[in-house]
């Protein structure tokens, strides 16, 4: 279980299995999320919103407003490929099976289930997206710092011609970067540069 906190909220991610998790915003607001495609189980939305027993997941699709919403969403290029707006996952274990909707539809389902609790659903989704943006920014910042460390240092003024730069490649260690290589730019003065060149040539021979 992992928790992300700020001054006002705490998002708790609790794994159900490798593909599904509970996402909890407060004591009663718990949603089931499909990790691989960011879709949410409709029944968990209704439960979190304390929807009356007379409301069932199938009923949402029969609404005129829902049909207009889905019709417009299906025109969006976002859903012209693999992403799905909704899916009935009948072959999952009890507690997980049922209708799932894309994250962009979660608040629409919550509004239908209970306008009062829909606000907290909106807050939950906003906090999750804030967390994701923060993690992405941290990764980009770490990469930028790594790049800055690799920038060669300056050379003495008037001695520019006494230095050369050498580029060599290195295989990437991370599995996701196997189709790329790391380029190293190294500053050397002329003497050490030629010494390295001799060693490189002798190694190749």
Image (spheres, grey):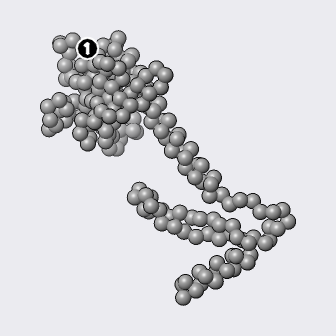
Q: Residue at x 39, y 16 (%)?
A: 119
Up/down of 119 relative to 185, above or below: above
Up/down of 24 relative to 115, above or below: below
Position of residue 52 in the picture relative to residue 204 (left or right): left
Quadrant holding the C terminus: bottom right
Residue that lies at the very extreme toward the bottom in this rendered image? 205
In the image shown, does 26 or 108 lie closer to the viewer?
26
Callout 1: SS: loop
Q: Position of residue 98 (x, y in %)?
A: 19, 30
- Reading the image, the residue beneath label 1 is 50
Q: Position of residue 7 (x, y in %)?
A: 49, 22
Q: Quadrant of residue 162?
A: bottom right
Q: Position of residue 68 (x, y in %)?
A: 32, 23
Up/down of 157 relative to 200, above or below: above
Residue 86 visible in image: no
Q: Position of residue 191 (x, y in %)?
A: 73, 78
Dot 1 alpha-carbon crowd within 10 angstroms: few under 14, some 14 to 19, many 20 or more: some
Q: Residue at x 40, y 39 (%)?
A: 77
Q: Residue at x 24, y 35 (%)?
A: 16
Q: Quadrant of residue 165?
A: bottom right
Up/down of 98 relative to 113, above or below: below
Position of residue 187 in the picture relative to residue 44 (left or right): right
Q: How many numbered badges does the structure rendering display?
A: 1
Quadrant holding the N terminus: top left
Position of residue 21 in the picture relative to residue 144 (left or right): left
In the image shown, does 88 or 138 lie closer to the viewer?
138
Q: Quadrant of residue 128?
A: top left
Residue 144 visible in image: yes
Q: Residue at x 82, y 68 (%)?
A: 159
């Amino acid at each position: 279980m992992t928790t992300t906190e700020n001054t006002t909220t705490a998002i708790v991610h609790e794994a159900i299995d490798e593909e599904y998790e509970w996402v909890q915003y407060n004591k009663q607001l718990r949603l089931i999320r499909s990790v691989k495609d960011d879709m949410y189980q409709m029944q968990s939305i209704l439960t979190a919103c304390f929807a009356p027993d007379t409301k069932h997941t199938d009923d949402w699709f029969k609404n005129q407003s829902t049909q207009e919403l889905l019709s417009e969403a299906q025109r969006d290029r976002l859903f012209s490929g693999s992403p799905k707006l909704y899916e009935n996952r009948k072959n999952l274990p009890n507690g997980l099976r049922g209708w799932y909707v894309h994250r962009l539809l979660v608040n629409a389902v919550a509004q239908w289930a209970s306008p009062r609790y829909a606000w907290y659903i909106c807050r939950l989704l906003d906090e999750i997206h804030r967390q994701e943006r923060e993690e992405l920014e941290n990764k980009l910042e770490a990469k930028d710092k790594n790049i800055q460390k690799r920038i060669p240092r300056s050379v003495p003024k008037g001695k520019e011609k006494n230095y050369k730069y050498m580029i060599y490649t290195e295989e990437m260690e991370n599995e996701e970067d196997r189709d790329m290589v790391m380029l190293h730019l190294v500053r050397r003065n002329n003497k050490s540069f030629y010494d390295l060149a001799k060693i490189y040539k002798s190694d190749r021979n």
